[in-house]
Image (cartoon, rainbow, N blue to C red):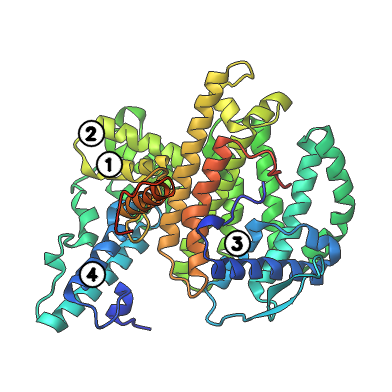
Amino acid sequence: MKKNPYEILGISENSTDEQVKEAYRNLAKKYHSDNYSGGPLSEIARRKMEGIDDAYDTIMLTRRGTAGAGNSGYGNSNAHGKSYYKAGSQFSDIREKINARRIEDAETLLDGVPELSRDAEWYYLKGMVQHHRGWFDAAEKSYSRACDMDPDNLEYRSAYNNINGGRSGGYKTYNGRTRRQGSCNTCDICTGLLCADCCCECIGCDCIPCC
Amino acid sequence: MFGHIKPKRSELKIKDYEVYRGVYCSLCRELGKRYGIIGRMILNYDLAFLAIFQMSFSDDCPGFVMARCPFNPMKKYNYCKEATKPLIIAADTAVIMTYHKVKDNIKDGNFKTRFISIFILLFVRRIYAKARKKNPDIAGIVENTMESQQRIEADNISSVDLAAEPTAKALSLLFSYDYNNGDIKEISAHFGYCLGRWVYLIDAMEDIEEDIKTGSFNPYINAYCLTSDNKEKINIAREKAKGDCLQTSVEAIKAYELLEVNRFKDILDNIVFEGIEDETLKVYDGRKANEKKSI
């Protein structure tokens, strides 16, 4: 059942262009390939992001006659993950196995590589295999080793940041509201000031005369 | 082991709490119908969550009615009009998991736990035989989990990944049980895996000090060579465990975000986004004195 593009972005058909862009931005932040890089759900996330890009393009095309995804600032997010990958890797067969979800086969091939040939890419692919299995501790160590051996490689860095980022908690929710302990937003500040004013009024002063 | 997956009540709207309570009470009712009064006593939050999760994908709302609680006749609660398949699965799973947990306590627990567990086993054994007959698939999943867990503990490993694997795999199978849609099954399997891993790790974090005393298996004790006199090392291990729990819960959140549920979204959002992290931090800070750990 093909979904209405407005439904995919989670907005009504009467939304302004700005609201459409805002909805696209929020979804792109959630489903960007960097958030799922190296993990077992990266393919599903990529397809979801493709659907969101298509929905955004469809809406902008009908409204303005031009596709908008290129102007959104996130570009082709589904190509984003692939652009990190250098062609001509010595482990392209292992990469293919991982992409085809044949994790055991990929691991067998990886373990067959002699220790002296285990470069940064080997550790990155090892990390991917462990990540797919759900062995996050081992995956983090492997990605870290890959980053140490090849610090400029964005693909390895992205995978490491993705898996390491969760350690401190406080993951952003859909509307960007963090749930870190002790965080304070403008609502908290206003509420605090109002409470302070009420307390002051109780003892005879009045900080904010209009409340 | 049980009772960690629950909502952060302070952030839950009252209307959502009423629905959550409705599913929880419906699970109690289903346990009572299938397994009698003993069944009702093994009700727990984690399996209420499993039921809500699976019910959230159905096209039709189960519909709720109000009726009096048999344990508290002064109060009326919401119950599902009919037993949905997820409630039935959750009820069978509760009995099977409790039976195995009790047997495990008899093997590994301290004197008091063992004594109480032997007593409970006398009652649970009969309903377990019933549950096993009604749902041999789930009985098989849990049996395999217990066997794998025992093998790992016998090897006395220090890898948290391997130690958590049996519980993680069990919940992966339970959460992806019975789906036809490929993507939903795959995402639910990974979500369940992360949740199972989190349940194991949070228990391991909570039990570090006690396990040192009783000599019970704990991957953190092995990884850090912990002894009861080295408080600094224990704190380092607990800090790592907290990080592992939070990291795992974020992976669970990312999987959950790929799902499109048809109902109960606010309750599930609360549990997944708020409840799990809240529970991790509560357990890390030390459980309050009046909150007892369930079996």
Nearest to viewer (mark 1 / mark 4): 4
Between B174 and B206, which is closer to the camera in this rendering? B206
In the rendered image, the quadrant that contains the N terminus of chain A is bottom left
The quarter holding residue A166 reads top left
Count residues near mark 4 (Cα–Cα under 10 Å), then give few for <14, some for 14-19, many for 20+: many
The chain identifier of the residue carrying mark 1 reads A
User: Which residue position is annotated with label 1?
Assistant: A156
In this figure, which residue is indicated by the disc labeled 2?
A: A150
What is the spatial separation of the Cα atoms under label 1 and label 2, in whole angstroms? Answer: 8 Å
- Indicate the chain on which mark 4 is placed: A
Check the image and report above or below for B49 versus B226: below
Q: Which residue is mark 3?
A: B49
Judge from the rendering whether residue A124 lies leftward or rightward of residue A16; answer left or right.
right
Residue count near mark 2 (Cα–Cα under 10 Å), binned few <14, some 14–19, many ≥20: some
Residue B30 position, x and y percent, is 75, 70
Badges 1 and 4: C-beta atoms under 8 Å apart?
no
How far apart marks 1 and 3 lie (CA) works out to 36 Å
Name of the residue lying farthest toward the front = A204
What's the amino acid at mark 1?
Tyr
Tell me the distance, in whole angstroms, between the alpha carbons under discs 1 and 4.
25 Å
Residue at point 61% right, 36% down?
Answer: B206
Identify whether A201 is placed above or below B151.
Answer: below
Secondary structure of the residue carrying numbered label 3: helix
Residue B111, relative to residue B174: is it above or below? above
Q: How far apart in space, not on screen, are marks 3 and 4 (Cα)?
A: 33 Å
Three-letter code for the amino acid on which mark 3 is drawn: Phe
Disc 3 versus disc 2: nearer the observer: 3
